[in-house]
Image (cartoon, helix red, strand yellow):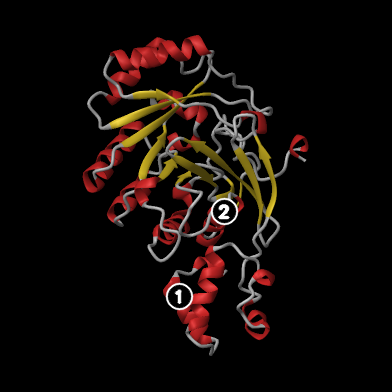
Amino acid sequence: MLLDYDKNEIKEYVNVLGEPAFRAEQLFDALLQAKNLEEISNLSSSFKDKIAKDYPHFCILKKLISVDGTTKYIFKFDGGEIVEGVLMKYKYGNTLCVSTQVGCRMGCAFCASGMGGLKRNLSAGEILEQVLLVNRDQGGDVKNRKVTNIVLMGMGEPLDNYDNVTKFIKLVSSSEGINISQRNITLSTCGLVSKIYQLADDGFCVNLTISLHATDDEKRKKIMPIANAYTIGEIIKACKYYFEKTGRRFAFEYALVSGENDSLKDADKLVALLKGLPCLVNLIPLNYVKEKNLIGTGERQVRAFLDRLLANKINATKRRTMGADISGACGQLRRQVLEEDK
């Protein structure tokens, strides 16, 4: 797909077709504007015929708007697969949560995205397509972006699709493209340690967020199968390495599950684990997923847990739940349209 190409690769593509160089500029501009082929007025019919098989069919299948203004987008790709993304509006800008895989093979106990397993990886261009579609839908263009920040936190484990995700980061942050700085991109991972090292060594400087959700390995194994491959100690060591290489603080996401990981004893263990690290703890009241049997922690206990962290000089916040009424909150994204969404 043409969205997988950077500008130089588009130029080479046009050259191989035997077309004049200015066609590459026209084609690249049309792609960045998320125009479907029939909408492009400055390309000849003969040229469109040549590129039709490689040109993306931009498609927002459906969008749902929450009472809090959050918008969930349901995207449909050329092969018919469906993924979801969420646009959240803040005072500092608009953050788009994008998906990196169709489904997920990590199997976290609280997450809807992994139900049914992994169908396939998204290409770099398919991840970029989500950004370009939402930017256009919100009335933005390349110079006046309506998507200002990106979180790789939707369906899928980004580091399980390393090559496509890192190519996407290069494409979306390119000064020749939509030019969203890597400092405005957050990558959330359940902790694929070897890939964290690779991300640092390959020169990326996105914000790194780890889905932790437990204070010891045995408890983490119960809710996150990846804990059978990597220990918390190994994850923290990799995070320290990432900080040394990039100078970027890292964050830990901690979803509070009633009766599982939300006691003050758990909070004290988290303090001991993270004391002195250049990190942020992002507490997440567990969001409802109808097929799961886990219950989110009540507001009073969430507050007590947060206060215990803050009292012990741990930099921590409680994530504001956004889009829960449209199944657009953390852990609720899926690879099919729910009956209540139709």
Residue 274 higher or lower than 14, as above or below: above
Q: Nearer the viewer, residue 232 or 188?
A: 188
CA–CA distance in space, label 2 to label 1? 21 Å
Q: Is 298 placed left or right of 230 in the picture?
A: right
* Residue at x 62%, y 83% (from the top left corner): 47
Q: Residues within 10 Å of mark 1 (few under 14, many from 20)?
A: few
In the rendered structure, which amino acid carries the disc numbered 2?
A: Gln
Label 1, on which residue?
Answer: 9
Disc 2 is placed on an element classified as helix
Q: Residue at x 58, y 52 (%)?
A: 139
Residue 130 numbered tag: 2
- Which image quarter is the C terminus in? top right
Please say if 185 is above or below 279: below
Q: Earlier in the sequence, mark 2 or mark 1?
A: 1
For label 2, count other residues whose C-alpha is less than 10 Å away and answer few (under 14), some (14-19) or many (20+). many
Residue 174, position in %: x, y? 39, 62
**Residue sitting farthest toward the bottom:** 18
